[in-house]
Image (cartoon, rainbow, N blue to C red):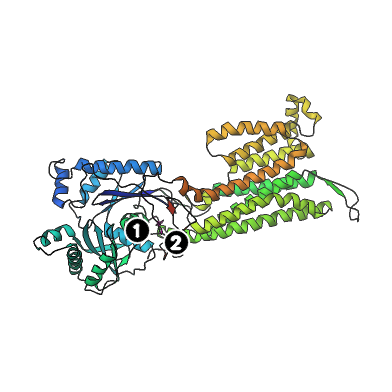
Amino acid sequence: MSITGGWLAIELHGGGARAVVAWPDATVVVLPDVAPVDGAGIASRSAGALAAAWDTGGRGGPLAGPQLVELFGRVRLAAQRAADGVPGSVTVVVPAGWGARQLPVVRQAAAAAGFGAVEVMPAAVAVGWHLLAGGVWLEPGASVLVCGVDGGCAATVLRRSAEGFEVLAAVDGATVAAELADTAEASGSDLIREVARRAMVGAQVPPGMFDLVCAVGPDADAGVGRLLTQVCAAEPMLVAEPQLAAVLGAVQRGPVPGSVEVSADGGVPWRDLVGVALAVVASLGLFSQFLAGGQRYGPREKLTVGMVLAPWGELAFAAVFGLVAVAGGLVLAVTAQHRPADPGDAGGVGWVRGRVEAVALVAAAAGGLVWAAGYALLAASYFDADIGGFLRWSVLPLVPGVVALCVLAVVVWRRATPPAGSWAQWLRFPAAAVVLAGVGAALIGWDETGLPWLLRPLAWRLYQWMPDGQTTIIGPVGRLGGALVGVAVVLLAVRRPLLRLLFGVPAGVLVAAMLSWRVTGALAVGFALAVAAWWAMRAAVPMLRPLLLRPTASSPPQPNVPGLGASADGLPGAPYGGPRGHHPGSWSGAVHGGWGGDGVGPR
């Protein structure tokens, strides 16, 4: 299975809301912070004020229900501009201490703002997913204390479970601060220590027994770490992007189950099988036409070198279609062999399949060269001629395509997750281009060789309409074939139907008008370059998309995102350790991708 939609995470904090948009290809964009219309914070609102605000339509507390709706609405507009549409999955991260009274308010406000079903996640739980995605190993049963310092202070004790995290205790600093206000000597340091101590007591975890202590939030620094060390008797971890740890963890966990379209890509789609079969038929048919239409001049099996007069462009076309068939066939074989037994295995199997598909692309490049060399060997044996000329027309046109396949293999290996759907779908060669170019090449070959005889009725009809075409080697039949090849090149170059119509017709007319028997080989080489360019674009889009999605100058600095979950059930598809997955310097820009990793499956 493969996730085919994007998702959005919104964190409510003391200054308003911060949001992150993520796509299945691991592109992540951090949106500018959104402040409430009244300029007041959100996290500091009490449970009673928040619940009463919705019940009374804004007359019962400082945060009115319409104001929360307006806040979500502004986030929705910003996400819609960044994602070119409303993300299908929405997760709202709420501060520690929010409970049963606030969560229904958040869901109702999100629904009123235009979001569908949303998942509400405590900030500490989101931080836990962020730690897992960053490579922190937490076994089931492990205890984690998360201290959030964002103007105020909150502490939460989590326990790692097989499905995720459960909250053992959560202490909001606002209540503790009110109690400490009566103490004249109370300070911010005392507040942090007391909040952490009460969370430990509530969770019944003694000092020194935590598997991990973490400090997050804009105000998390080494000083906060020293205070937590005094209370917890454990050295705390400071994450690289403490102010974004919670909102990033929400997207690294994965989309809300059932909210994002999931496509089943196990097995072999019939469309891909048909595409590979068409390429094989085109390759073998054109090579047969090349052998049948060629003529050898000079004695056979003599020291004197003979001469071969043949439609060399047909040999180049046959070799190109052979490369397309080998590449498509190997990718389909990997798709059929490596598929998840159940939806929960989709993340790990997808990672393995991505790596194997990268190897398959390199093997396809080598296999295409072997296929072309085999054509050259058979033709040299058939015509009893030197193999050099046959290699020149069968192997050399494939060099750009082989290089493009190798570059594409590097991209697949490093990303492991396709831009959309599966790599088999992303690398599906357009079958229409194969049909048009194959038929066009056969029509050109008929004008040069008179074979196959099945095309004679078509030639007779065209000669009735264009009687002057019988005086040249390339007549109406060959020019029709050239037009089809020109249209096939346009199909590879552009994707939108309107652009294909606008450029395809002029390109077909231009090729048909310029075609002569001396340039049929050049036309075949041009088609080979178009195929190589198509594969090159398949490799370039995943690398260029983060740069094309660069936020405006007003957007906040973008994070170095470790890894995002890609499994259909919401568990992380590929959490991993260390800085693997994001490669500094290779995906420069304000938007980063980071699916890859060497670990597989949920921690």
- What stretch of residues is rendered in magenta? 553-568
Look at the image and tell me in which quarter the C terminus lies. bottom left
Q: What percent of the width, then of the height, locates residue 357?
A: 54, 58
Relative horizontal placement of residue 180, taking residue 520 as reference (left or right): left
The image quadrant that residue 559 belongs to is: bottom left
In this rendering, position of residue 406 left or right of residue 13 = right
Compare residues 550 and 422 and report the one nearer the observer: 550
Residue 555: assigned label: none
Q: Residue at x 73, y 28 (%)?
A: 462
Q: How many marks?
A: 2
Numbered disc in front, either 1 or 2: 1
Disc 1 element: loop
Q: Amino acid at mark 2?
A: Gly
Residue drawn 44% across and 65% down? 599
CA gap between label 1 and label 2 equals 26 Å
161 within the magenta span: no
Q: Choose between 194 and 190: the one closer to the eye.
A: 190
Name the residue furthest left.
182
The secondary structure making up most of the magenta span is loop
Q: Is residue 403 left or right of residue 383?
A: left
Q: Helix, strand, or loop for circle 2?
A: helix
Mark sitting on residue 241: 1
Image quadrant where one finds the N terminus: bottom left
* Label 2: how many Cα within 10 Å (few below 14, some 14–19, many 20+): many
Q: Nearer the viewer, residue 428 or 554?
A: 554
Identified at 75% across, 29% down, the residue is 460
Q: Can residue 450 be spotted in the picture?
A: no
Q: Which mark is residue 348?
A: 2
Image location (x, y in percent) of residue 137: 36, 68
- The vertical placement of 293 against 516, above or below, is below
| Front-most of residues 539 and 271 | 539
Q: Residue at x 46, y 49 (%)?
A: 546
